[in-house]
Image (spheres, rainbow, N blue to C red):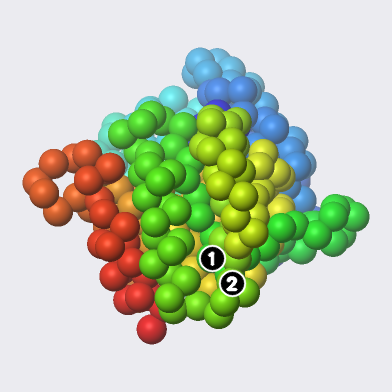
Amino acid sequence: MQFLGTQIVSYPLLYQIKQFWPQCHVRVVAQDAVGKHYLSLPWVDDFTQADSLPEVFRAMDGQADLVIALHFASEKYGIAAMLKRPEYRLGFKNGRVTDFIWTHSHRKNFSEYMGLANLRVLAALKEFEPAVVARQCVQALADQCQSLGSADSTTGDIVFMPGGGAGDYKRWPIEHYVALADLLKTRLEPSAKFCFVMGPDEADEYQRLQSLGRHDFVYLMTRPIAEIAKAVMQAKLVVANDCGPSHLAQFSGVPYVGVFHESNREWFWTRETSVDVLPQDGTTEIKNVTPEQMFVACQQVLL
């Protein structure tokens, strides 16, 4: 789905809003047609697409008690909040004219993981532990598999996420994932399985993997978010490109290794259970990250 990562990093925030105020009505307002990302969530009641300032103003319910603006580069959300004046107005301070309108705020830092920053905007109003809430959110998504009567998701000891819809510059080659699997098998039980999470953009990679006929490879191909969350929560390790589903893994707290063409702290949650791996040859060619590099990183978080 388009813009998947940018939407997933807001999921724990929406989850925690409903934990604080279970009976509240949550409306998500976004400038793009991303309603399908939100309306399947149990924490969202409706979605409105609004781009211009008049549209945002109309979408901001005059009866609302709380407005949270996650857009940190536009003034229109602050202007609409100033005109509507809900009791609580939460947003990022980012050197903008409308910074003064927020009753509670968090200073925008582009080296801070976006999913964590979003949670800290809400924590400015009411304290909670972001890491705990993030994991609870992924577990709640995983629990949807059972509550919605979905079939059990395919799971593996290791989850690989080779996606990267933004372009090939974010895609670590699928052959490298296969080589990494072979290296990891030296550390795992003989029965260990590797689950590949893939979408429509990975159709070619999916066919190549299937042609290998490997019984230790299983696949989640174009599956719902709930099934991906379940696979993540049951994994011992997740290895991922910079892609949308990688944020489910980072929120879960499961040992995580991310492969990047260059350092990008805004999309990587730095903590003890995670490692980011970059090319060591001075380039920004993600294909130059070797399976051996990744294996060392995997061993580091699996200890």
Q: Position of residue 246 (x, y in %)?
A: 49, 52
Whether residue 86 is visible here, answered yes or no, is no
Give amino acid for label 1: Ile
Please give the residue where the numbered disc 2 appears in the rendered image.
192
Going by the image, does 3 lie left or right of 183? right
Q: Position of residue 295 (x, y in %)?
A: 33, 67
Q: CA distance from mark 1 to mark 2?
A: 8 Å
Kindly give the residue lying farthest to the bottom in the view shown.
Answer: 303
Disc 1 and disc 2 in contact, CB within 8 angstroms:
yes
In this rendering, the count of numbered labels is 2
Instruction: Label 1: state its secondary structure.
Output: strand
In this rendering, the answer to whether 39 lies above or below 113 is: above
Please give the residue where the numbered disc 1 appears in the rendered image.
158
Give amino acid for label 2: Ala
Q: Position of residue 160 (x, y in %)?
A: 50, 55
Residue drawn 59% across the image and 41% down it: 211
Whether residue 193 is visible here, answered yes or no, is yes
